[in-house]
Image: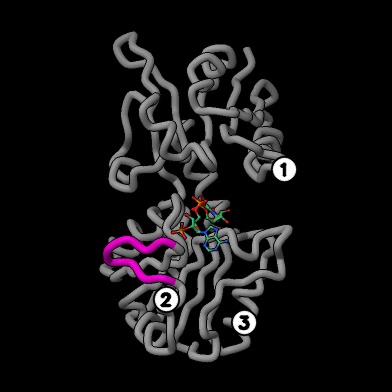
């Protein structure tokens, strides 16, 4: 019988996950496994489409990482604390169908940044306050790193883009781009920060993985900062999703 997995989102187009898992199933010789893209115009379509497809597990992407939560039976601790889900597993407990939500973005980010963190990274500036930024904050705080969000519409305790000056950059040795700025096809765009204030003590992390070296990272590198892109986070989050589905 076909074992169906998939990605739930709004407009999926080319999806990393479909390519990744299709290749993985081939490599593992899992000929009856298939990974499909499932586009929903609204999350309210989820229950009917889910029943129709009987997915054994699925990933969730923009804009449904939070909206999926009311449809799930339970969340693991990280997903609960972050308030966003990007992986769901179906299993049965005492005859009852359970849909459990996880946040493997957090795991992926943790694994990818771990080797790069030093004692200098006491404070982080997180650009953007969307879904992924919450996973970033969750991980960095678990390392005791203080986080400050930059938002176009700053809430209490956050700052605006105009507030980022030389001192803010000096004070935050870790800067994480958690916005889609610079992502394909807008590859010439970059977050507006004073790059000339960066030093060799800074680490710039871009969650964007296409292109592999965004202008944000190029400018950081040109000013002496260490850089890390979103590719290893992406691979690690997919591997963690697979471990949950197979456990
Ligand atoms: P999202 O929920 O849409 O949030 C992005 C946030 O960035 C928005 O909430 C907004 O924050 C800010 N933003 C968006 N457009 C902006 C603009 N033009 N100028 C300034 N700020 C802007 O998206 P997300 O899920 O958090 O993902 C963010 C990025 O991370 C995407 O590029 C995504 O592909 C990438 N990502 C990568 C991985 C990985 O594994 N590498 C995993 C997840 C996400 P404010 O409203 O507060 O300004």
Q: Secondary structure at mark 3?
A: helix
Where residue 107 sits in the image (x, y, percent)?
42, 52
Of the residues under marks 2 and 1, which one precedes in the sequence?
A: 1
Residue in the image at 66% along x and 29% along y: 36
Does the Cβ of the disc 1 residue fall within 8 Å of ligand 1?
A: no
Of the residues under marks 2 and 3, which one precedes in the sequence?
A: 2
**What colour scheme governs how the chains and residues are painted in the rendered image of this protein?**
one colour
Task: Please identify the quarter of the rendering in which residue 18 is found.
Answer: top right
- Give the crowd class for mark 2: few <14, some 14-19, many >=20 residues within 10 Å: many
Residue in the image at 62% along x and 41% along y: 17
Of the residues under marks 3 and 1, which one precedes in the sequence?
A: 1
- Where the N terminus falls, by quadrant? top right
Is there a contact, CB below 8 Å, between mark 2 and mark 1? no
Question: What residue sits right under mark 3 in the picture?
Answer: 219
Comparing 105 with 2, the one in front is 105
Residue in the image at 39% along x and 24% along y: 71
Q: What label does residue 14 carry, if any?
A: 1
Q: Secondary structure at mark 2?
A: strand
Task: Please identify the quarter of the rendering in which residue 247 is found.
Answer: top left
Q: Is residue 75 above or below residue 33?
A: below
Q: Which stretch is magenta?
A: 153-160
- Give the crowd class for mark 1: few <14, some 14-19, many >=20 residues within 10 Å: few
Q: What label does residue 174 carry, if any?
A: 2
- Left or right of 50, for residue 138: left
């Amino acid at each position: 019988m076909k074992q169906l997995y998939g990605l739930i989102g709004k407009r999926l187009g080319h999806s990393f996950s479909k390519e990744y898992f299709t290749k993985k199933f081939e490599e593992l010789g899992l000929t009856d496994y298939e990974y499909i893209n499932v586009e929903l115009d609204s999350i309210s379509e989820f229950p009917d489409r889910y029943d129709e497809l009987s997915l054994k597990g699925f990933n969730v992407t923009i804009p449904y990482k939070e909206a999926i939560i009311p449809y799930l039976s339970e969340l693991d601790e990280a997903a609960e604390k972050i308030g966003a889900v990007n992986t769901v597993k179906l299993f049965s407990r005492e005859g009852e169908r359970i849909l459990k939500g996880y946040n493997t973005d957090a795991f992926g980010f943790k694994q990818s940044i771990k080797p790069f963190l030093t004692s200098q990274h006491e404070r982080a500036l997180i650009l953007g306050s969307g879904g992924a930024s919450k996973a970033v904050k969750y991980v960095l705080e678990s390392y005791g790193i203080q986080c400050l969000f930059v938002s176009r519409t700053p809430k209490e305790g956050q700052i605006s883009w105009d507030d980022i000056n030389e001192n803010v950059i000096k004070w935050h040795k870790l800067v994480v781009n958690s916005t889609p700025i610079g992502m394909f096809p807008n590859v010439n765009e970059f977050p507006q920060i004073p790059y000339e204030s960066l030093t060799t003590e800074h680490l710039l992390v871009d969650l964007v993985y296409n292109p592999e070296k965004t202008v944000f990272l190029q400018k950081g590198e040109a000013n002496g900062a260490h850089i890390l892109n979103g590719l290893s986070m992406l691979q690690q989050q997919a591997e963690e999703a697979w471990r949950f589905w197979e456990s």
